[in-house]
Amino acid sequence: MGTVGLKIEAEWQESPDAVRRQGQALQAPLTELLRRLRRHPPNLVITCARGSSAHASTFGKHLVERHLGIPVGAFAPNIATIYKQRLKLNGQLFVTVSQSGRSDDLIESAAMAKAGGALTATIVNDTDSPLARSSDIVLPTAAGPELSVAATKSFVTSLSAWLHVVAEWAAHDELRVATERLPDRLSAAMRLDWGTALKILGKARSLVSIGRGPTLAIAREAALKLKETCNLHAEAFSGAEFLHGPIALVESSYPILLFIPADPAGGGLRLLAADLRRKNANVLTMDYEQHSHGLPVLAPDHPDTDAVCLIQTFYGLVIRLAACRGTNVDVPRHLQKVTRTR
């Protein structure tokens, strides 16, 4: 039998307050990061992360490319740890994202990047960790202790940290103000009820989650959480990538979650939703243009911060779904809190 999930639920409920206090914790290191970036502007950003933190980096990629026009690539840690190759990164920005800051591959990758000439920054919860000590700039998520194996508030605060970085780097006042509103919006998102999805997801054996733009990271994180906490196989795709083959899987017994952004990418996902329903797919949408098949979402504020609110509501759903499916949401099988890989 599963448990109620007391740890994960408590930590999920702490997310708005963690995001609220994060701004002050970020002020000094972010000022230093921006000073160095403006003195020597990079023409490339490289991210390095695992698990939920890798999904946070996907969100960062969207923000940096969308608002700064700087290409972002994901670094494969085995280049540093196994193949011992040093990349030529002189003058570029290398960003690691981690909760614990103790995974050997991230630590070694950051050291490689620094040796290769990059400015290294880490978005990390444990500011006394080896990863933090090996980085030029430490950007604290300020999530506080997170005991549940499956990350919730550390993921939300990693997204929020990226919002702060890009809003200030791009001098984007609209994004900056929306980020200031985010804690209250997260609290409101927690009160939304997605319980109507339980009947569909409770009996599912496999499903797909789809996003695009700011919600691609959300779709990926949702799929991971379904695996971790509910022992439910889930795959994540961009709306465009789904059409290049995976759409062949569509049938009535195969649920599809569509995280539709409140920006120009939303139109294409709505067309996809309509096409999937014509194919008799079981589609659940999270859409700011409300439809009869949709789950409730907050009124739109800013597309990037709205995406963070979607995962906050989803976490409430996944806690309930784990109870329905009889899994221990606080201690997923075969997993541990700190995963150390090379």
Image (cartoon, rainbow, N blue to C red):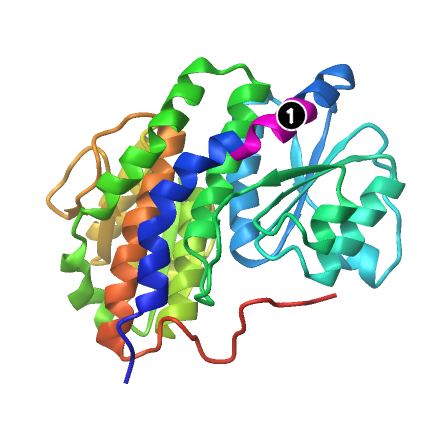
Give the residue type at disc 1: Ile
Q: Is residue 31 magenta?
A: yes
* In this picture, residue 267 sits left or right of residue 118: left
In the rendered image, the quadrant that contains the C terminus is bottom right
Q: Which residues are magenta?
A: 25-33
Q: Residue at x 48, y 51 (%)?
A: 144
Nearer the observer, 280 or 337: 337
Q: In the rendered image of this protein, does residue 253 appear above or below residue 267?
A: below
* The image quarter in which residue 255 lies: bottom left
Quadrant of the rendering where the N terminus is positioned? bottom left
| Side of 127 where 67 appears, left or right | left
Task: Give the percent coordinates (x, y) of residue 81.
Answer: 81, 60
x then y, percent, for residue 82:
83, 63
Measured along the vertical axis of the image, is residue 211 above or below residue 320?
above
Q: Against 159, is 170 above or below?
A: above
Tell me if I can see residue 122 in this picture.
yes
Q: Which residue is mark 1?
A: 70
Q: Residue at x 14, y 40 (%)?
A: 291
Q: Is residue 4 magenta?
A: no
Q: Quadrant of residue 332?
A: bottom left
Q: Of all residues shown, which one is farthest toward the left?
A: 292
Secondary structure at numbered mark 1: loop
Q: Depth check: 79 or 91 in front?
A: 91
